[in-house]
């Protein structure tokens, strides 16, 4: 899955579309997802982001759905936490005895709040997936430079993005080696192998960073990364502005009248 994330932008149909326009569209949908409190408007943002990412960009639908599995686990846990409330008397749809004459209750309002929170989270995630799966990191850094984002933030984003895949590849190699030696044969042995794999990746990350920094110094590295600048296509950017305005307008209409 991580390799799909890394290379999906290079195969995207929207790869050569104006980066600033895509970033504006992504931020607009993200802003709507954060501010939205209506189920219908949030579903609209979610479906819009999926439409642009899957149908307009050509992203593989099955792999795209799999990308939601990891965040879905945390979202579901959050929804369960929001839906459960402790009261001194029985109330709501479900009420279970707890401690000291108190009850764990699930009310209609808590369920509604949990559902809205889940849809809001998925709409924000899909908005970020849109820019991730349609634009490579080099073009994003170029736009961020034009927006006068602090250079340190751009460098950290660039380094973290690349090291995620480097360390993930190293982790996969270690786990594959452990599995070939029956390192996950049994519960206790699996825990022991996982702990050793985690510590090995942690140590190897420091070694990897040291080697990369030495190679940079050998190439006269002065402490600053040089990013290529990204030109803005005015026609495509205006097209993205119009689409963003339409999406935000429909979102506001649905928030007010539905």
Image (cartoon, helix red, strand yellow):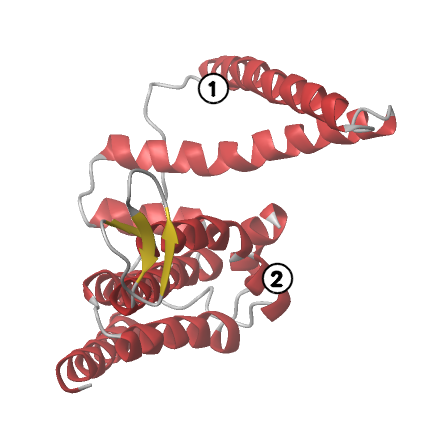
Dot 1, crowdedness within 10 Å: few (<14), some or many (≥20)? some
- Residue 50 % position (x, y): 45, 72
Query: Above or below — where is 101 with respect to 216?
Result: below
User: Which label belongs to residue 61?
Assistant: none
Residue that badge 1 annotates: 216
Q: What's the CA distance linking mark 1 and mark 2?
A: 35 Å
Left or right for 77, reference 250: right
Q: Residue drawn 58% across and 32% down?
A: 166
Q: Looking at this view, name the residue that lies furthest to the left.
A: 256
Q: Which mark's residue is nearer the viewer, 1 or 2? A: 2
Residue that badge 2 annotates: 63
Query: Above or below — where is 93 with respect to 88?
Result: below
Q: Which image quarter holds the C terminus?
A: bottom left
Q: Residue drawn 48% across and 55% down?
A: 72
Left or right for 149, reference 25: left
Residue 230 can be seen in this image: no
Is 94 or 245 nearer to us in this picture?
Answer: 94
Is 119 or 212 nearer to us in this picture?
Answer: 119
- Residue 169 % position (x, y): 65, 34
- Element marked by disc 2: helix
- Element marked by disc 1: helix
Quadrant of the image occupied by residue 257: bottom left
Count how many numbered circles sit on residues in the image.
Answer: 2
């Amino acid at each position: 899955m991580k390799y799909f994330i890394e290379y999906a932008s290079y195969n995207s149909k929207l790869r050569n579309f104006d980066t600033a326009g895509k970033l504006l569209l992504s931020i607009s949908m993200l802003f709507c997802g954060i501010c939205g409190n209506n189920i219908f408007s949030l579903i609209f943002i979610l479906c819009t982001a999926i439409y642009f990412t899957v149908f307009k960009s050509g992203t593989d639908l099955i792999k795209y759905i799999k990308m939601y599995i990891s965040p879905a686990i945390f979202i579901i846990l959050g929804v369960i936490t929001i839906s459960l409330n402790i009261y001194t008397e029985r109330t709501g749809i479900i009420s279970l005895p707890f401690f000291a004459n108190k009850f764990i209750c699930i009310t209609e309002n808590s369920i509604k709040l949990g559902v809205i929170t889940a849809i809001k989270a998925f709409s924000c995630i899909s908005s970020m997936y849109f820019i991730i799966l349609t634009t490579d990191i080099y073009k994003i850094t170029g736009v961020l430079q034009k927006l006068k984002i602090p250079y340190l933030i751009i460098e950290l984003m660039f380094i973290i993005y690349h090291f995620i895949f480097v360390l993930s590849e190293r982790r996969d190699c270690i786990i594959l080696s452990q599995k070939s030696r029956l390192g996950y044969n049994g519960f206790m042995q699996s825990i022991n192998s996982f702990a050793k794999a985690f510590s090995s990746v942690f140590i190897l990350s420091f070694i990897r960073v040291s080697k990369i920094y030495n190679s940079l110094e050998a190439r006269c590295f002065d402490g600053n990364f040089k990013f290529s600048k990204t030109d803005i296509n005015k026609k495509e950017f205006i097209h993205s502005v119009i689409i963003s305005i339409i999406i935000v307008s429909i979102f506001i209409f649905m928030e007010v009248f539905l």
